[in-house]
Image (cartoon, rainbow, N blue to C red):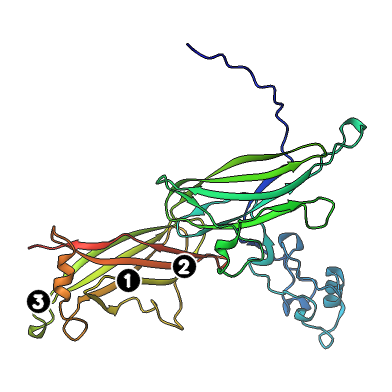
Amino acid sequence: MSHQRYPSHEVKEPHSVSLKVLRLSRPSLVAQFPLQPPFSSSSTETTHHHRPPIPASLAYSPISKNKSADDANDADTLAGPSDAKPLSSTFTNPDPFILSPILNLPPSFGSAYVGETFSCTLCANHDIPPPIDGGPPLSRKTIRDVRIEAEMKTPAGALTKLDLLPPDHHDDDDKGKQGKTGVDLDPSVYDSSTLQKVLSFDLREEGNHVLAVTVSYYEATEMSGRTRTFRKLYQFICKGSLVVRTKTQSLSKRGPGVKGKRRWVLEAQLENCSEEAMQLERVGLGLERGWICREDLNGWVDQEGKDKPVVKPGEIEQVCFVIDEEQDGDGDGDGDKVAREEGGDGRVGFGVLQIGWRGEMGNRGFLSTGRLGVRVAA
């Protein structure tokens, strides 16, 4: 026999605390395309000096604050050869570059890529609603013990609880101490009407990610009080930033003195599939026990003072390493045995390829491949 369900008469009121989630990302430089004015044969002095570009084509005006563009043009036209001043004294940027010193804020959420660190700020605000239709002011509510919790669900289905830090936090010593106590919000007190936290999460998988944020607080009025909670979900897609293709080839033995020891060449192609250029800072091998990297054929990997390659969107950078099995003088003398005992199917594992880079505005990225190896004949 089914039980009769009585409808609930509790009125659903809007929450006294609102939540805003803003992604923290770096700005970009505004691009400009300077256009030179047409040449004129009426003035002979203009042949000795470059005329300033058309102001409408610049995002950043090169005119100094002391003189306007009209004053600068008149001085350049009327002054004689002995009185002519170079435009560098009048213009702060006489030869404008395609990138201006103006920063452009991200207009939207943007794209998230594997290897980057996803960061955002969570703001719980207590706003007093205005009176309805000019009526008396609404009863004031006291908001106490406000807490924020956040979790990230990855495409693999794992749910990770995230550490929330204050905006001005720089040390990692108090990560476990945050979020244990709530905060009281008072709109009448300056800087006490909002609770702000910052979270960071390293993106390691492609696909849909879901950020779940839970806000709980105690709402007290003149007559009663209650604990209220609400939860919001934010979904975004993480794309791949680098496509790594590897190839392994065995080389011949180096001589009779290295009997039983083999040499391998590991080649890797790194394709930038993101929307911005990146500068490769580090490409190295995390080798397993029994292997040693004898030669670095790239010329810039792990070397100070070398120019790091810049890979634009769609471009490919190729790296190469020479790997040897450890000999008696390199380690414990049983490198061949250690390397072959790893896999029972005749597959030899080398380790992982670790790649570090920086974006256009200096944001860091890091990617580690799966276990690399090769199948050898018995």
Q: How many marks?
A: 3
Q: Position of residue 32 (x, y in %)?
A: 66, 62
Q: Dot 2: what SS? A: strand
Q: CA distance from mark 1 to mark 3?
A: 23 Å
Question: Would you say the residues marked 1 and 3 are in contact, meaning their CB atoms lie under 8 Å apart?
Answer: no
- Residue shown at 53%/14% (left/top)? 3
Q: Dot 3: what SS? A: loop
Foreground mark, 3 or 2, reads 3
Identify which residue, 12 or 366, lies in the foreground.
12
- Residue shown at 75%/59% (left/top)? 56
The numbered mark, 2 or 1, whose residue comes first in the sequence reads: 1
Identified by mark 2, the residue type is Trp
Q: Dot 1: what SS? A: strand
| Occupied quadrant, residue 370 | bottom left
Q: Is residue 251 visible?
A: no
Q: Position of residue 191 (x, y in %)?
A: 78, 58
The numbered mark, 1 or 3, whose residue comes first in the sequence reads: 3
Q: Is residue 272 visible?
A: yes
The numbered mark, 3 or 2, whose residue comes first in the sequence reads: 3
Which label belongs to residue 334? Answer: none
Where is mark 3, residue-wise?
260
- Residue shown at 19%/62% (left/top)? 374
Identify which residue, 240 or 83, lies in the foreground.
240
Q: Position of residue 288 (x, y in %)?
A: 26, 70
Identified by mark 3, the residue type is Gly
Q: Position of residue 34 (x, y in %)?
A: 68, 64
Which label belongs to residue 285? Answer: 1
| Disc 2 residue crowd, few under 14, some 14–19, many 20+, Cα 10 Å | many
| Disc 3 residue crowd, few under 14, some 14–19, many 20+, Cα 10 Å | few
Which label belongs to residue 357? Answer: 2
Above or below residue 276? Residue 73 is: below
